């Protein structure tokens, strides 16, 4: 049986009847068809754009932003120490888009680096704007970056080598920030000046782009980290809000204690033994000569304080071992405690 087909005159008559009010325009509620029965009252229906699909949830995006805010702080501190000037790095944007949209928004030429995580399949992209690349190079070569001209050309081999010192510190900070989710080691496998020539994923593939702003004295530029969804898909469940906040509760785990202990065990500290203290005038200090004796009020048999990074930690006795001066720890220093009496030998 075929359904009746309206001709043009019938369609015009129906539309005029609706406009005049003779026929009410009744719209039925939307029906939801699925395996379970739904009335449609409490069902949220949202428009879906197939050109820009959102595969990462809002909680996971917030977790990624929090993770890379920690990376920005660590990277800024590392750059400040390396360049001997204050460098501020902060997260400007964190959004998901297609790879083609990301590539089309990048300048050409630029510093485009392909990053390979050791325990994940696929590659990430780290793009650093020439507006901050050349001031950093000028700073490394002893310039002041005051009247610096930004050339519109690809980086030379020497400039690429200099920037590798910056990107290597960035990868170390990135590994440190990702340690709460998964222990990863990032390596740069290739560099390119034209982003259009790099195709790590299909153009319509969803990527998460974290945009950073880098400020150094009177210069500023941008840095973008592109993370394809298929690369971090195996760890997406760990990026959920519950897993993210739960990660902070496992800091007291023995493995974390051992890792922190090993890291602290390699740190060097300055240890000094304070034999005695006294005061003198500037005039006496200026007239000191070899053979002069400086007297103190401290007996030679009283223990001396051992200071670690300027803080008194132990009492020690002065001695000698194999012809070298030595200090033997007697007791730990307690707040308000007087030096213990040394036993005669």
Image (cartoon, rainbow, N blue to C red):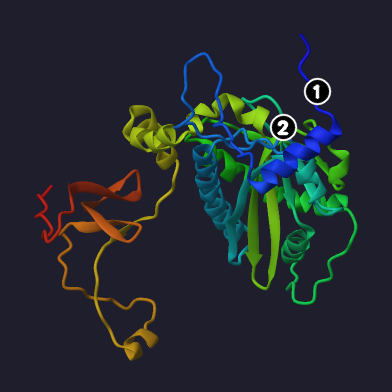
Residue 13 falls in image quadrant:
top right
Residue under numbered circle 2:
123
**Mark pair 2, 1: CA separation:** 57 Å
- Marking on residue 260: none
Q: Residue at x 16, y 68 (%)?
A: 298
Q: Residue at x 24, y 76 (%)?
A: 278
259 vs 237, left or right, is left
Q: Nearer the viewer, residue 72 or 208?
A: 208
Residue 229 falls in image quadrant:
top right
Comparing labels 2 and 1, the label whose residue is closer to the camera: 1
Residue under numbered circle 1:
5
Q: What is the x, y in percent for residue 283?
A: 34, 91
Helix, strand, or loop for circle 1? loop
Q: Nearer the viewer, residue 35 or 313?
A: 35
Q: Residue furthest front?
A: 22
Q: What is the x, y in percent for residue 10?
A: 80, 33
Q: Earlier in the sequence, mark 2 or mark 1?
A: 1
12 vs 293, left or right, is right
Q: Nearer the viewer, residue 335 or 27?
A: 27
Where the N terminus falls, by quadrant? top right
| Number of numbered callouts drawn | 2
Q: Is residue 225 visible?
A: no
Q: Nearer the viewer, residue 135 or 248?
A: 248
């Amino acid at each position: 049986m075929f359904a009746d087909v309206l001709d043009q005159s019938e369609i015009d008559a129906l539309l005029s009847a609706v406009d005049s009010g003779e026929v009410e325009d009744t719209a039925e509620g939307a029906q939801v068809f699925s395996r379970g029965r739904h009335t449609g009252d409490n069902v949220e229906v949202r428009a879906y754009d197939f050109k820009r699909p959102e595969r990462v949830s809002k909680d996971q995006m917030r977790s990624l932003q929090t993770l890379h805010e920690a990376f920005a702080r660590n990277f800024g501190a590392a750059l400040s120490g390396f360049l001997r000037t204050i460098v501020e790095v902060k997260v400007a944007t964190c959004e998901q888009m297609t790879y083609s949209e990301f590539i089309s928004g990048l300048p050409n030429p630029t510093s485009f680096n392909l990053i390979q995580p050791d325990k994940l399949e696929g590659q990430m992209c780290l793009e650093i704007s020439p507006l901050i690349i050349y001031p950093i190079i000028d700073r490394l070569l002893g310039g002041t970056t005051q009247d610096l001209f930004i050339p519109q050309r690809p980086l030379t081999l020497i400039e690429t080598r200099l920037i590798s010192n910056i990107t290597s510190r960035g990868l170390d900070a990135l590994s440190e920030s990702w340690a709460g989710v998964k222990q990863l080691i990032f390596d740069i496998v290739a560099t390119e000046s034209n982003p259009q020539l790099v195709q790590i994923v299909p153009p319509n593939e969803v990527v998460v782009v974290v945009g950073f702003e880098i400020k150094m004295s009177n210069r500023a530029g941008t840095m973008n980290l592109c993370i394809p969804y298929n690369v971090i898909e195996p760890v997406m469940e760990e990026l959920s809000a519950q897993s993210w906040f739960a990660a902070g509760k496992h800091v007291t785990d023995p493995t974390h204690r051992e890792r922190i202990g090993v890291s602290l065990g390699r740190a060097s500290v300055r240890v000094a033994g304070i034999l005695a203290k006294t005061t003198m005038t500037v005039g006496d200090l200026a007239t000191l000569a070899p053979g002069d004796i400086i007297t103190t009020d401290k007996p030679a048999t009283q223990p001396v304080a051992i200071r670690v990074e300027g803080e008194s930690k132990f009492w020690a006795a002065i001695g000698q071992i194999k012809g070298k001066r030595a200090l033997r720890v007697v007791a730990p220093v307690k707040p308000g405690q007087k030096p213990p009496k040394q036993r005669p030998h």
